[in-house]
Image (cartoon, rainbow, N blue to C red):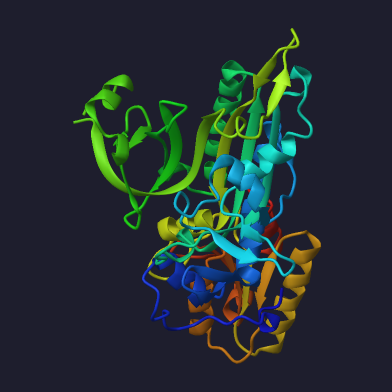
Amino acid sequence: MLQSKLFTKTKKESPADEVSLNAELLIKAGFISKELAGIYSYLPLGLRVIKKIENIIREEMDAIGGQEMKTSILQNKEIWEKSGRWSDELVDNWFKTKLKNGGEVGLSWTNEEAHANILKQYINSYKDLPIYTYDFKDIFRNETRSKSGILRGREFYWKALYSFSKNEEEHNIFYEKAKQAYKNIFARVGIGHLTYLTFASGGTFAKFSHEFQTLTGAGEDTIYIDENKNIAINKEVYIDEVIESLELKRENLIEKKAIEVGNIFSLGTKYSNPFDLKYKNENGEDNLVIMGSYGIGLGRLMGTVVETLSDDKGIIWPESIAPFSVHLLSLGKDENVIKESSSLYEYLKSKNIEVLYDDREDLSAGEKFADSDLIGIPYRVVVSKRSLDFGGFEIKKRIEKEGKIINKDELLTILLKPSH
């Protein structure tokens, strides 16, 4: 993409009404636009990142047997009344609206009821199970306060998978697969080294649920980490009984702030029961389906990457989710520089390498470098009179201080390496 054609522009000043680092940097760099508190639009650069996160999650969900579908945002009042969660007294963050022809609908704030109601049409026999359904969708929650940028929004984009199993044993086997899939996701988006499987309250049907918490001083949660076992417990379950049951020692637990980037829950029959979601076993007897829930907020994950991997110059995107692989900068107005820059841009595109080409002629080298650091693309390649005099192009990784001059073949080798 030509940067001169990109309609978004970077901003020199941080937005005055933002207190979170993720929102400050993403707005300054032109990835998102704030509409209202807790409501953001994703601009071209931001959407490219979200789509890459989505594809990583999709690959990991498909690998454990997930079947993708798309559930409606508008929700039937009668369905939610069955589970008791339509009542404002029980759920205080609904967005609801009246229909012109009478009646009322709500905007999805979670998905258990939607999936259970759909699957009731297709589950009859033990031969129909297990089933694992998931979708990506916009979710709406009428939060009282929203001050954490895209970490906690009133409107956000998420993935939720629901498992439908015959019994606890079958459920537990999948639950462990989901745990590993989540670990894979966080490793692939670049924050696996900062993210801990965290024990939290399991509610009615399980001793524990599991969160995935990423360490950052900006975190809303407090967790206690056992670095030897590479696990953590949430402050809400930090009691002697829990610590002992996990065979943890209290020198060994280190208190840290963290952001929850994903969660998995065993639901038992909590949502299959109100929908009479049953199957007939081998003996023709009716049994309630065992369910599980597995959620990740994509915007929240994107914001966590920004919170944890940025520096004082801007964002540092991991290669796996960066909007582009290379930021190509053409410096100066020398005709040969412009010609070589344009030629390199076309060459890299022909090799299916994603390039943002800063072809803007009205900016100084310093301004282009500052924009490049702020946007945070993994590799910066500079074409200048100096680089051409030394026989090629200057390449620098975003995380490095110094660049080096290389030729076209060396550049291609670096950019097409396996991890890329």
Work out which residue is located at the far right of the displayed protein and give it: 350
Task: Residue 122: give x, y in percent of width and height.
Answer: 79, 32
Residue under the point 69% across and 24% down: 278
Q: In the visual, does 1 lie left or right of 350? A: left
Q: In which image quadrant can residue 143 be found?
A: bottom left
Q: Where is residue 77 in the image (x, y as percent from the top left)?
A: 64, 52
Residue 190, percent across and down?
51, 49
Residue 325 visible here:
no
Specify whether residue 98 is in view: yes
Furthest-left residue in view?
Answer: 251
Q: Residue at x 38, y 81 (%)?
A: 16
User: Left of 200 or right of it: where is 389?
Assistant: right
Image height of 376 relative to 341, above or below? above
From this view, report whether residue 52 is shown above or below residue 388: above
Q: Kindly indicate the quadrant of the structure image that contains residue 394.
A: bottom right
Q: Say which of 96 and 174 sits in front.
A: 96
Q: Relative to 11, is 312 on the left or the right?
A: left
Q: Residue furthest front?
A: 102
Q: Observer-nearest residue: 95 or 215?
A: 95
At 42% from the left and 33% from the top, the residue drawn is 203
Residue at image point 43% right, 47% down: 260
